[in-house]
Image (tube, rainbow, N blue to C red):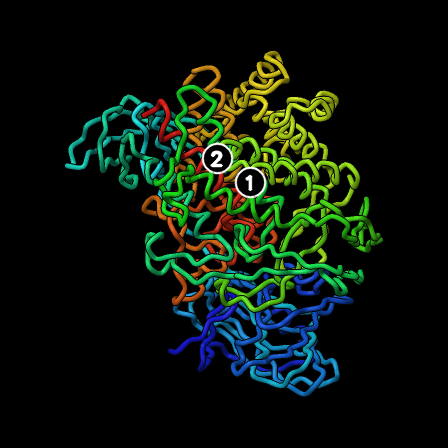
Amino acid sequence: MKIKMIGLAVVALSLITSCTVTEEIAKESSADANQNTTAAEMLSNGAFTTNINNWWLAGATVKVKNQEACMPIANPGSNTWDVILGQAGIGLEKGKTYNISFDAYASEETQLKTLIQHQGPPYTSHFATDTLLNKKKQNFAYKFTQTNDSDAQSEFQFQMGAQKAATICVSNVSITGKAFVETKKTNPIRANQVGFLPQAEKIIFFASDSKQPLPWVLVNEQGINIDMGRSQVYGLNKASGELIHQIDISDQTQEQQGLIVKAGEHETFPFDISRNIYSKLKYDALSYFYQNRSGITIQKSLVSRDDLARPAGHTSDVVTCFDAKDSWGNEWPGCDFSLDVTGGWYDAGDHGKYVVNGGIATWTLLNLYERGKWINNAPVPFVDGTIAIPENGNGVNDILSEARWNVEFMLAMQIPEGKKIYAPLGDQSADNRLKLTEIDGSQLVFHKVTDDNWTGMPLPPHKDIQKRHVGQPSTAATLNLAAVGAQCARIWNDIDSKFAQTCLTAAQNAWKAANKHANIFAYNNFTGGGPYSDFDLQDEFYWAAAELYVTTGEKVYADYIKKSPLHLDTPKGNIGAAHDIYWGYTAPLGTISLAIVPNKLGASATKQARENIITTAKTYQQQLQNEGYNIPYSVEAYPWGSNSNLVNRSIFLIYANDFTNDNKYLTAAASAMDYLLGANPLNISYVTGYGENAVQNPHHRFWAFSADENSPKPAAGALSGGPNSIEMSDPIASVLKKSCTGQTCYSDNIGAWALNEITINWNAPLVWVATALDEGKLN
């Protein structure tokens, strides 16, 4: 069957429906209604009460008003699939009956194709029909029986291409029936699928309801039993709802390959014990940043596979302010200047570039360099010539060359002197209506640059034709530049003094601008990217002051640090808002810099900063005993990007080892990596390309093979966000919501952006931790 792919779907050129369309109905009889007693709503946000959340759109823009989504289609293309509004995560069960209904009309008489098909190969069509629309709003309803095999990964679509240029409006979209959720049995015996460092703990996990220890054997590559014993019964692992046994082979310290642990009829994937477990991963994880650069050709000679090379995207990212009415009715006046913001890293699965997310990612890479520079026995990683980037051989440490690509983008996002800007000041209303005020925007920093609307998938950046804008400045973005600019200034001072001065000037100007406009909060004024909203900026102010003080020693920054309620702050390790660092909680980044980079705050302050880091690490390390999978992570529910919290916590654990020389902290960090690489309830490695059962379908616009066979599979070394039991906002996650627990709320699906996205701020700590473990004392 010939196919054409756009968005998250692959659309058959010649649709063959395998369902039985019984009738178009205006009103279903009570007998029909009672036929399927387990009927439930299967779509999320079918009434468009939250804009187009949970939907994706390709080939058009959308405006949502009064719970109606209207798409002005200026270029309908030549194929129906050239314009699509779709939603993934539709599970159909064989033999069950489903009802589709929606209201629709168009500005001109035109056809609308409605279909449900499998998301990926073999792209099986389950339902398809054409509907004639005119200017009169009508209700359309269809009933069909699923005659194909059950399918847990189907997608609902409105295809609107190949028709007249018209505006099509839909509302009250509904699919009811018994949603099919595929239950997959996972191997009950789980381990780090890559392996273990020689001096690390080596725990294998076995899910079993047996209350008695169970026998196990360790088998080498030649099939010889080299160790045996009985498991230790751990009991209930609350984070997954399983009863867990632990198998400890930590006394195996000799380097070996192809080991397998067997328990009954089950066995692990083969793994190694080696000093080089993380030697390749650190390079692949860092290559993620080069491969997600904007504004530059990704060269075949610098990537591991030819299909990962691509033309440059957004080579002239010259943009101006958003100047239209947003989805909530706010009129944005725009501005009378433009900025050239070419370069930087694409943030995550989309084509947006964000200062706040880029800030913490850049800081993390630069901090790894500073750790090597200032901590005894911590080597400076990635010396010039060691990673595959265009700047290789320029005489500058390679991790600095990679980080500079994004520092220069952040600098470009700063508003020139004397420019006026419109921005919302202070609190936003509950209905997202704003009071926009004209202010002097001098030296403030724009929050983001993105497409005007979410792009479809797959879409490599060089094929993105949407108009792009900067949104508005934000105090948070301004403080991110102040912090990273200060860090840049001290690092490049002896490398490129002119660039260092540029960074310092920008940082100091940003600090002044942020203090002048301390309450400009991020706002999602157009929908081509995420808002990264943050309404508490005490942590950003402290972080920026700390970085500026470390760099300059100026009293104004010291005074701010000492008076801040976040003075020498570190995470408390609890379940509250400040339990893990991320783009919205950055104060501990300043404390880390004060703890490791020589500064004038005094020996007692340095000592206290280090003690606070150790206290945090101790809290994390003690949590291992509360977790069946032996991880430094005890939380009541798993948040968006939970996997990143494990590597971010490991930064504190590794610093505690640096400060105390106590290997229990390093061992805890290695245990966190065990979980990420396969020692988890789903028996999956959350790092692409690492382990026999690794993530294959991350949410990404151009590493999109699972959505389009002509797109590349993901590069190795990308960390998936992982289990998320709180913000289950995508259609895939919403299906899992009622049937998963903590660590099991995950699907390796390209449409699961709340579970399976990959981002720069998650891969940066992966680089940090893989590098520190590879060069640490457990090998």
Which quadrant is the N terminus positioned in?
bottom left
What residue is shown with label 1?
Answer: 499
For image coordinates 72% across by 80% down, the residue present is 138
Question: Is residue 150 visible from the viewing direction of this image?
Answer: no
Picture coordinates of residue 729, whole percent (x, y)? 61, 53
Pointer 2 with pointer 1, Cβ within 8 A:
yes
The kind of secondary structure element at disc 1 is helix
| Closer-to-camera residue (233/507) | 507
Above-or-below relation of 80 to 427:
below
What residue is shown with label 2?
Answer: 495
* 472 with respect to 409 (left or right): right
Picture coordinates of residue 734, whole percent (x, y)? 58, 54
For image coordinates 49% across by 76% down, the residue present is 19
Amino acid type at circle 1 is: Phe
Residue farthest toward the front in the current orientation of the protein:
498
| Closer-to-camera residue (539/205) | 539
| Closer-to-camera residue (9/630) | 9
* 356 with respect to 292 (left or right): right
| Closer-to-camera residue (778/609) | 609
Which quadrant is the C terminus positioned in?
top left
